[in-house]
Image (cartoon, grey):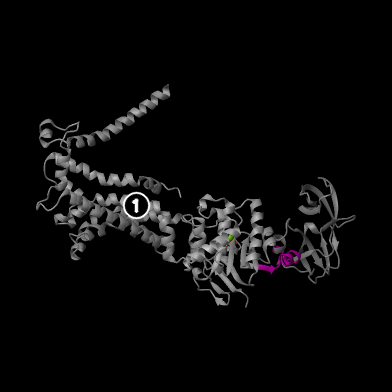
Amino acid sequence: MSFLDLKNVTKIYPNGTKAVHETSLSVDEGEFMVFVGPSGCGKSTLLRMVAGLEDITEGDINLDGQLINEVDPSERDIAMVFQNYALYPHMNVYNNLAYGLKNRGIDKETIEQKVNDAAKLLQISDFLQRKPSMLSGGQRQRVAMGRAIVRNPKIFLFDEPLSNLDAKLRIQMRLEIKKLQQKVGVTSIFVTHDQVEAMTLADRLAVINNGIIEQLGTPIEIYNNPESLFVAGFIGSPQMNFLDANLNNKTLSAENFEIKNIDSDYNGEVTLGIRPEHLIESENGLINLKVELVEQLGSDNLVYGQIKNIKDFCYRSPGNQTIKKGDTLSLNIEENKYYIFDKNTGKRVNQI
Amino acid sequence: MTRLITSGFSHFILFIGILIMIVPVWMIFASSTHTGLTINTHGLQMFLGDSFYENYMRVLLYQGGFFKEITALKMFLNSFIMATGVAILSVITSLMAAYALVYYRTKYATLLFWIIFVTILVPLELRIFPTYSVMAELNLVNSYFGLIVPISASAIATLFFRQFYKTVPDELLESAKLDGANTWRFFVDFLVPLSKTMIVAMLIFMFVFGYNQYLWPLLVTSSEQYWTVVMGLKMMSGSIVHRFAFVLMSMVPPILIIIVLQKHFIKGVFQDK
Ligand SMILES: Nc1ncnc2c1ncn2[C@@H]1O[C@H](COP(=O)(O)OP(=O)(O)OP(=O)(O)O)[C@@H](O)[C@H]1O
Ligand SMILES: [Mg+2]
């Protein structure tokens, strides 16, 4: 059994909403697990069940070899960082950090030692006497982290802790969280709906949709090998392009091109997925893209255009190319980078 | 120029208002420093006389009542004990009641709250006889306990605390739980300090409420030992100047409480968060 073990966990809210369906998941000790998915897919619910803030309707959760279904949150030895930080407004930063330790009956000197260590690690030593209302967003974020770290819990839970920060600070804090987690080595679960955040932070990623884990794996596995239409569309930026097509006898026929020798025995209607970065310009390519918009990012360009009836088809071109609106590009798909999904079930049908 | 005139005019109106409120009080005060004879022969006085010390000392120390067992000083003490007791007890009970109503997720919390709320519409006087019987039954007539406890459950204070607790974000409770706080610790370490200003405001409200009680203390005390100031206003005998002095002094404790705590009071009632 691994460090944290969820077995067939289901959550049905009293009003009948089924937020999590029979989910099983193992997290190893020291691992950084990220739950990613669109709004309302049940990420927070899953996390809150681990924390003990929501009852488990069905299933078992084991933490460190102990069944914790019925264990009170205060007894679970778990720390959580909330989206709005939930700092204690009437306590200064020092007491915010110290409160959890006091409740565990730790003596004063040890508390002081631990709080000061954590404060130093997070560079908040200068604000220990301030109230949370006198701190900036980023500083509050650090205090919230400090409150989690100082207790040295079995597991850290983060529920979208970066979404209240501005873009630049978010990237900086993302980096710091990752570094900090590697340094402290505490098992962590991080919830986000931002796929870039998910990719950069995760040791392993759980892509959740409608209360189900659609795919579980390292970020690169999931990026390279999405098992469903949903995962393919969710992971990767800019988003994967999708085209309707037909698969018959290992031949894929889309509106204006064909690909032969597909590694699949499936026959029927499919959706073809192509990542913008898997397209290359070449003479007599499969796809003719009529350019409508070019976003120049410096390192590369995002080219949006139309192929026949499909709008907003995206191609990522090297930054040194000059492409203008109105150009027509001839594109090929990189060898074996076609993602083919059953149109009805959304399951991938070809091997890569 | 017109602005000067309008502002001068509004100041004039305000000034009139102040006069209307202050002058009677001042007249009572001025009159209370004269001898009874002066008032009886020359009517109310606008200017200070020279019997201030004599009149006020006589009021404070005079053995009043039918049995001559009570002084005004003792009445002030009684009133103070009663008002303080009512204030503290009702704040404690409503803090706890509100806590249970908001945080114990019983199905009936809302119903219970409305039942409590409806009692605001029922005047104290309506239940005063049954309450008296209970107190008599328990042998608590003529005691501070009997004076204080039956009027120390405040629906209004409960309402205020409940509304305040409802604005406390859930994450705070959850965060505290994960930090190892149990139900009691969350109450003591979070809700009580967070509602500090509101507690002060409620203490003032309930102090004044307790201080102003008339019918209940009248009913539940037969011994003069337990007379309160407000009862004394009615019972006090003696010359008109002594009554004036007593009336004025009876206004002092509530005013004093409000002046001392007004900063918190205003903050507490109009707290924006
Ligand atoms: N207390 C509740 N009672 C009933 N339904 C709820 C409750 N909390 C959440 N839900 C429902 O459960 C589903 C999952 O909610 P959850 O908060 O886990 O989503 P999420 O993935 O965290 O979304 P977001 O990214 O917006 O935070 C949603 O459909 C939501 O409406
Ligand atoms: Mg959420």
Q: Does the magenta stretch include residue A215?
A: yes
Residue placed under numbered mark 1 in the picture: B202
Q: Position of residue B269 (x, y in %)?
A: 39, 48
Residue furthest to the right in view is A283
Q: Give B169 or A307, whichever is nearer the viewer.
A: B169
| In-image side of A349 versus B116 (left or right) | right
Pick the residue in front: A295 or A27: A27
Q: Label 1's element?
A: helix
Q: How many labels does the image show?
A: 1
The magenta segment is A213-230
Is A256 left or right of B11, judged from the image as shown? Answer: right
Q: Residue at x 33, y 27 (%)?
A: B12
- The crowd level at tag 1 (other Cα within 10 Å; few <14, some 14-19, many 20+) is many
Instruction: Mark 1 and ligand 1: say if the CB distance to the nearest ligand atom is below 8 Å.
Output: no
Residue B178 in view (yes/no): no
Q: Which of A340 and A170 is in front in this view?
A: A170
Residue B245 in picture, x, y percent from top left: 18, 41
Picture quadrant of residue B243? top left
Asked if the magenta segment contains residue B98, the reply would be no
**Measured from the top left, where is residue A141 in percent x and y?**
58, 56
